[in-house]
């Protein structure tokens, strides 16, 4: 299975150097709840030549802090499910029954 790099855009952009990276293997994960995130993901995707199919938009809390149950429900499991359904990973459950993915 291909390896993919996930970049999380949550209101501000923390750039991870992607020089020399195959853009087909870069995934942009964006928080739809943050004002300006649509423009920011579009700008980043154009500059890095990331295909639209590699953009995953989630509705996440706006807060900088998140409880463990909220993290699992809104980010971890949602992202894992999307990575699986979009064909970026295979799905399995870990030793305690949480959804996990193999990228």
Image: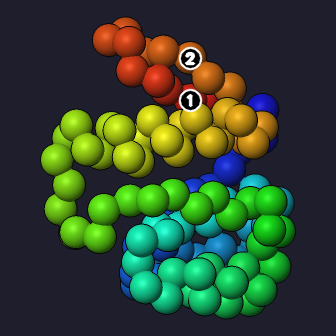
Number of residues whose C-alpha sits closer than 10 Å to that of mark 1, classed few (under 14), some (14–19) or many (20 or more) = some
**Left or right of residue 27: residue 94:** left
Colour pattern of the rendering: rainbow
Instruction: Work out whether 100 lies above or below 56.
Output: above
Q: As rendered, which of 23 and 19 lies closer to the eye?
A: 23
Please identify the quadrant where the C terminus is shown.
top right
Among the 4 quarters of the image, the one containing residue 10 = bottom left
Q: Position of residue 61 (x, y in %)?
A: 30, 62
Distance from label 1 to label 2 (Cα)?
6 Å
Q: Residue at x 74, y 60 (%)?
A: 54
Q: Which of the labelled discs sits on residue 101, or is there none?
A: 1
Question: Residue at 75% across / 42% down in the picture?
Answer: 86
52, 14: nearer the viewer: 52
Toward the viewer: 37 or 8?
37
Instruction: Check disc 2 and report the residue beneath it.
Output: 92
Vertical placement of 68 versus 19: above or below? above
The answer to whether residue 60 is left or right of residue 83 is left
């Amino acid at each position: 299975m291909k390896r993919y790099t996930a970049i999380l855009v949550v209101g501000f952009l923390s750039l991870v150097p992607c020089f020399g990276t195959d853009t087909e293997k870069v995934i942009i994960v964006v928080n739809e709840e943050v004002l300006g995130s649509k423009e920011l993901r579009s700008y980043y995707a154009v500059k890095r030549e990331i295909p639209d199919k590699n953009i995953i938009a989630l509705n996440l809390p706006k807060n900088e802090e998140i409880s463990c149950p909220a993290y699992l429900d809104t980010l971890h499991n949602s992202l894992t499910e999307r990575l699986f359904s979009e064909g970026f990973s295979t799905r399995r459950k870990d030793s305690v029954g949480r959804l996990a993915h193999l990228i």
